[in-house]
Amino acid sequence: MDNNISNLYICSTVRHVMLSVFHAIKSDKKSTIVLFNDYQNIPPELINTHKLPSKIKITLASRYDLTSEIKQKNSLEISY
């Protein structure tokens, strides 16, 4: 298997993040965990990643911001 391939986990709940961290720790690959923290109204300051292995990165995202960005890009690219 190609060592350049990394794991990607998309999460919307704390439970999913915990499960993703568990799987990422067991893997020998780098892992990125994307948490849509607005789903459970999780304040970003509650997410402490200081004790995670360096191969695991958690990125916080907003469903609203992502949806708005996609809608904005699509409206700019569509021409008739």
Image (tube, rainbow, N blue to C red):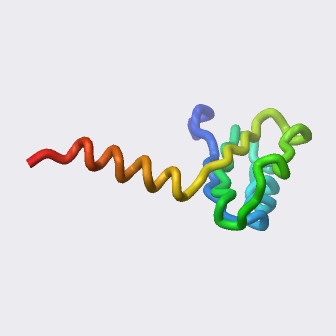
Residue furthest out toward the left: 80
Q: Nearer the viewer, residue 47 or 34?
A: 47
Figure check: 38 above or below 26:
below
Q: Taking 17 as reference, is 65 left or right?
A: left
x and y percentages locating residue 36 in the rendered image: 64, 57
Q: Taking 2 as reference, is 41 left or right?
A: right
* Residue visible at 52% across and 57% down in the picture: 64
x and y percentages locating residue 46 in the rendered image: 84, 52
* Residue visible at 49% across and 51% down in the picture: 66
Q: Nearer the viewer, residue 59 or 37?
A: 37
The quarter of the displayed image where residue 52 is located = top right
* Residue visible at 52% across and 51% down in the picture: 65
The quarter of the displayed image where residue 32 is located = top right
Q: Nearer the viewer, residue 10 or 73?
A: 73
The quarter of the displayed image where residue 30 is located = top right
x and y percentages locating residue 47 in the rendered image: 82, 49
From the image, which quarter does the N terminus lie in? Answer: top right
Q: Taking 80 as reference, is 20 left or right?
A: right
x and y percentages locating residue 23 in the rendered image: 76, 55
Q: What is the total number of numbered labels drawn onto the structure image?
A: 0
* Residue visible at 26% across and 42% down in the picture: 76
